[in-house]
Amino acid sequence: MKATQNERKKDNSSNIYEIRPIYETEYGSLYNDKIESFLDSDAGKSIKGKVNLIVTSPPFPLIRKKRYGNESGEAYLKWLEDLSPKLTELLTDDGSIVIEIGNAWVKGLPEMSTLPLEALLAFKKAANLHLCQHVICHNTARIPSPAQWVTIERIRLKDSFTHVWWLSKTPRPKADNREVLAPYSKDMMKLIKTGRYNSGKRPSGHEISTGGFLKDNGGSIQASMLEDINGHEVSSSMLKMANTGWDADYRNYCKDNNLEAHPARMQHGLVAFFVKYLTRAGDLCFDPFGGSNTTGWVAEAMGRRWMAVEANRDYAHGSYGRFQ
C-alpha cells in the first residue's frame, strides 16, 4: 500500500482534470475530492460503464448543517437528483446502486419529513432507474433520537432505522441470493432430516409440496430474522445490526493522528451483505461519499476492486486507518 498527496491538474486540451488518490491498496484507491468534480476528472472518466456496484450512504438531509457536508430542504433533493444520471453512467449494464438514506424531521416539530422519500423518488426518476428492492436497516445500538421528542417530551418513539434502496438500470441486474443464504433453523434442519412435513394448500391458497420444500438448498432465504455471514441478524428485507465495537482500530488511528473520525459510519455488515449479493470476485465497487471508507475496506476483504471519493480531508485521511 502507498499513500500519496492529492493533486489536481487541468489538461487544457481536453478540459479533464488529472487527480491522484491520497492512498492506494492492492485492490483500490481513495480520492479526496467532491464527487461532482471527481466525475469530471481522468479517474472519474476512467470508470464510466465499469462499476458493478455503487454502495453508499450520502449525507442525510438533517436539520442542522454537519461537517460532512449535508444539504437540507429542497437543496438536498435537487443535489441528489442532479447526481443520479452521472452516477448511473458509471454502472455496467447489469450493475446496481445501493443507497442508504436516513430519516429527517421537520425543524422544531415532532413531525417526520418526507424529504428522504422525495429525494429517493427524484433520484430514481432522473436516471430512469428500476427499484429492485427496499430494505430496512435497523441499528439496535442507535441512541434515542430525536432527543427532544423521544427522551425529553416522551411523545415519539426511538428513530433507529434507515431505508436502503437497491436500484439498477435494468429490472434484472447481476444478483444471486444463494450467495447470502442464512443458516437453517434447528426446526428446518429437523424437517429436512426426517423428510416429514404437512404439505398441501394453506389458508392463503398457497400450496406447498413436500419434495420441493424439504430440499436442502444450503441455507434459507425465507423472510424471517436470520443470521448472515457477519454474525448479524438478517431477513430477506430487514437487516438488524449494532454499529458498535467493530471499528475500534479505525477510531484509534484517527485519535492517534489527530484526525476527526466520521460521525455517521456505514455499518460494515450492510455493505458486506450487498457486496456479496450483487458482485463477484474482481468486480468493481464504488462509493461516491466514502466517509470512513467502509465500502472500500469491505470490498478489499472480499476480493473486490474498489474506488471511493470523500470530500472532507480529515475523513479521507482517517479512512487510511482501516487498512493498517
Image (cartoon, helix red, strand yellow):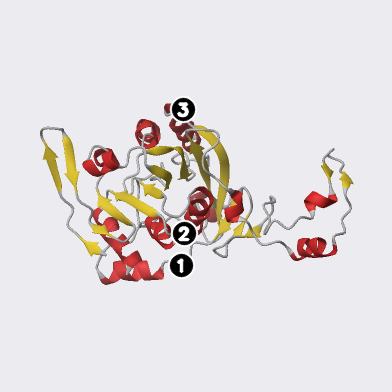
Q: Position of residue 68 (x, y in %)?
A: 32, 50
Q: Position of residue 97 (x, y in %)?
A: 45, 41
Q: Which residue carries the number 2 mark? A: 268
Q: Position of residue 9 (x, y in %)?
A: 12, 43
In-image side of 106 versus 255 (left or right): right
For this rendering, which residue is in front, 69 or 215?
215
Q: Which mark is residue 128?
A: 3
> Label 2 to label 3, Cα distance in Å?
29 Å
Q: Which residue is found at the position 52% from the left and 42% from the top? A: 174
Q: Amino acid at mark 2?
A: His
Q: Amino acid at mark 1?
A: Trp
The residue carrying pointer 3 sits among few (fewer than 14), some (14 to 19) or many (20 or more) residues within 10 Å by Cα, namely some
What kind of element bears circle 2?
A: helix
Mark toward the viewer: 2 or 3: 3
Q: Amino acid at mark 3?
A: Asn
The residue carrying pointer 1 sits among few (fewer than 14), some (14 to 19) or many (20 or more) residues within 10 Å by Cα, namely few
The residue carrying pointer 2 sits among few (fewer than 14), some (14 to 19) or many (20 or more) residues within 10 Å by Cα, namely some
For this rendering, which residue is in front, 147 or 131?
131
Q: Which residue is found at the position 33% from the left and 66% from the top? A: 323
Q: Is residue 113 visible?
A: no
Q: Is residue 56 above or below residue 292?
A: above
Image quadrant occupied by the C terminus: bottom left
Q: Is residue 149 visible?
A: yes
Cβ–Cβ under 8 Å for marks 1 and 2: yes
> Label 1 to label 2, Cα distance in Å?
8 Å
Mark toward the viewer: 3 or 1: 3
Q: Which mark is residue 23?
A: none
In-image side of 78 versus 142 (left or right): left
What kind of element bears circle 1?
A: loop
> Label 3 to label 1, Cα distance in Å?
37 Å
Q: Which residue carries the number 1 mark? A: 246
Q: Which residue is found at the position 48% from the left and 49% from the top? A: 279
